[in-house]
Amino acid sequence: KCFAKYYKSQNLVPHHAWTRFEAALIEPLPITFRMTHLAPPAYRARAAPMLRRLNALHYQRLDAYQLPHDKHTLRWSAHSHSDESELRRWLIEGTDAGWVVRQELASMLPPHLLSPGADALVLDMCASPGSKTTQVGDIMQRRGSSSGAAISGLIVANDADRLRSYTLAKRCAGLGDAA
């Protein structure tokens, strides 16, 4: 109630559009994820047919995918023999191995737009849980390996919250040799 009252008083959304706006706010977000440079070709290839059958959108420049499902659909498929269930197992395997990062599409855009080179110096404040930080590292790795250059850049990532910093450190440790 307070939320609606506050935002209605801001006059950001026309009165006639309020109901649709409010419904959009509570709609679960679609599942989005990106693959890291560490994802082996065989692992990527296993997902291709599933992602096509599930009508996943592929954002090639981000090496990212968006599923037409929310996390609840994927969770409910855990015990079925469906494409969703197979994809769920594939995502868990990739996440555990550091090959897949679940990340909102809007969060993937800043590192992509920054487009750091292999020799970039990057300061990332409020960096936890580390999705954008690891994406910057991944971009730097790809740039270095595509040009044959060694990674000479540096990312300094920090977060004021100590507990969140542990998550950040764990994610960054998953960057492999680049960390």
Image (spheres, rainbow, N blue to C red):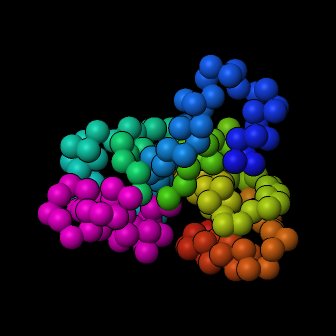
Q: Is residue 166 left or right of residue 147?
A: right
Q: Residue furthest left?
A: 81
Q: Is residue 40 visible?
A: no
What residue appears at the point 61 percent right and 23 percent down from the top-left corner?
17
Which of these two is toward me, 83 or 151? 83
| Residue 166: percent from left, percent from top | 70, 80
Q: Quadrant of residue 178?
A: bottom right
| Residue 148: percent from left, percent from top | 56, 53
**Magenta range:** 72-101
Secondary structure mostly seen in magenta is: helix
Number of marks in the image? 0
What residue appears at the point 20 percent right and 55 percent down from the top-left corner?
83
What residue appears at the point 81 percent right and 33 percent down from the top-left corner?
9
| Residue 8: percent from left, percent from top | 75, 33
In the rendered structure, does residue 81 fall within the stretch colored magenta?
yes
In the rendered structure, does residue 12 fall within the stretch colored magenta?
no
What residue appears at the point 71 percent right and 66 percent down from the top-left corner?
128
Q: Is residue 11 left or right of residue 21?
A: right
Which of these two is toward me, 126 or 139? 126
| Residue 32: percent from left, percent from top | 46, 50
